[in-house]
Image: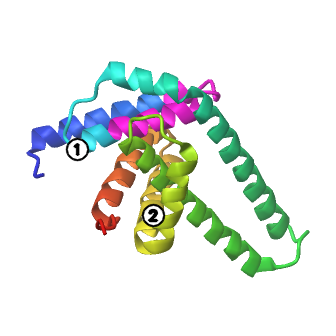
Amino acid sequence: MKRDWQETITVAADVALVGLFVTAASVPLVTLGAAVRTGSSAVGVIARGEKVSLPAMWRLFRASLLRGFVASLAVLALALLLAFNVDAVAGGRVPGGSPALAGTGVAVVVLLSIGLLGLVRLGRDPSPSSWREALRWAARTAWRQPGAAAAVAGVSAVAAALALFIPLTAPLLVGYALYAAHAVTARLVKTPSPA
C-alpha cells in the first residue's frame, strides 16, 4: 500500500508512541513481556493500515501479564547465561578463544531472530495463544528461511546501535524495531501454501 507523506508521518508518530508505551509499561519489569507483546500487536495493526483500539490493547496487555512474566524470566536467564559465556570465553577462563566467541555471537543472532519472529507472530495473533507456539513457528521459520531471519536480526541490530549512539532515542526505537521486524517479516517470510 502506497502512503502519502502525511500518512507516513502519522505512522511514524504512532510507532514512536508505541515505543514510548512499551518502554514505560516495562519499567516495573514484571510487565515487560506483556508490554512487548502488546506493542507488537499495536505495531501489527498500524502496519496493516488500521486504527489501534486502546481497549483491545488494554485487554491484551492484561491477558499477557502472567505468560509475559514467565517469558521475560526465560529471556533474562538466557541473556545472563550468554553474557556469562561471553565473559568466560573472552577472559580466557574457558578454552576456545575466538572460534568459541564467534560461535556464541552466531547463537545470539539466531536467538535474537527467533525471538523477534516470535514477537511478530504474537503481534499478528491477538488471541492469547501460546508463547511456545509462537517460538516454535519462529524457529521453524528461521530454519527454513535463514535469510529472512537474518534480516529481522539485522534491523533490530541497527535499532540497538542507534539506541547506543543516541540513548535519548532508545524508547522511540523500541517501536521502530518492532515495526521493522513486522515489515521485514511481511515482505520476506513466505508462508507455506495450503496443501
Q: Which of 13 and 187 is in front in this view?
A: 187
What amino acid does circle 1 point to? Arg
In the figure, is residue 35 to the left or right of 72? left
Mark 2 and mark 1 lie on one chain; the one further toward the N terminus is 1
157 vs 60, nearest the viewer:
60
Element at label 1: loop
Was residue 114 drawn as part of the magenta stretch in this picture? Answer: no
Residue range highlighted in magenta = 23-43
Residue 42 lies in quadrant: top left
Which residue in the structure is indicated by mark 2? 154
Instruction: Give x and y (percent) for residue 84.
Output: 80, 57
Q: Where is residue 173 in the image (x, y as percent from the top left)?
A: 42, 43
Q: Which residue is drawn at 73% across and 81% down?
A: 99
Say the numbered circle drawn on residue 48.
Answer: 1
Q: Closer to the observer: label 2 or label 1?
A: 1
> Where's residue 113, x and y in %?
51, 60
Question: Which amino acid type is marked by label 2?
Answer: Gly
Mark 2 neighbour class, 10 Å CA radius: few under 14, some 14 to 19, many 20 or more: some
Residue at image position (85%, 64%) is 88
Q: Reply yes or no: does residue 35 show up in magenta.
A: yes
Q: What element carries label 2?
A: helix
Residue 109 occupies quadrant: bottom right
Can you name the residue that lies furthest to the top here? Answer: 55
List x then y, in percent, for residue 121: 42, 49
**Looking at the image, can residue 23 be seen?**
yes
Q: Quadrant of the C terminus?
A: bottom left
> Can you say whether 141 is above or below 72 in the image?
below
User: Which numbered dot is residue 61?
Assistant: none
| Residue 55 placement, left or right of 90 | left
Given residues 37 and 88, the one toward you in this image is: 37
- The structure's colour scheme is rainbow
The residue depicted at 33 percent of the width and 67 percent of the height is 192
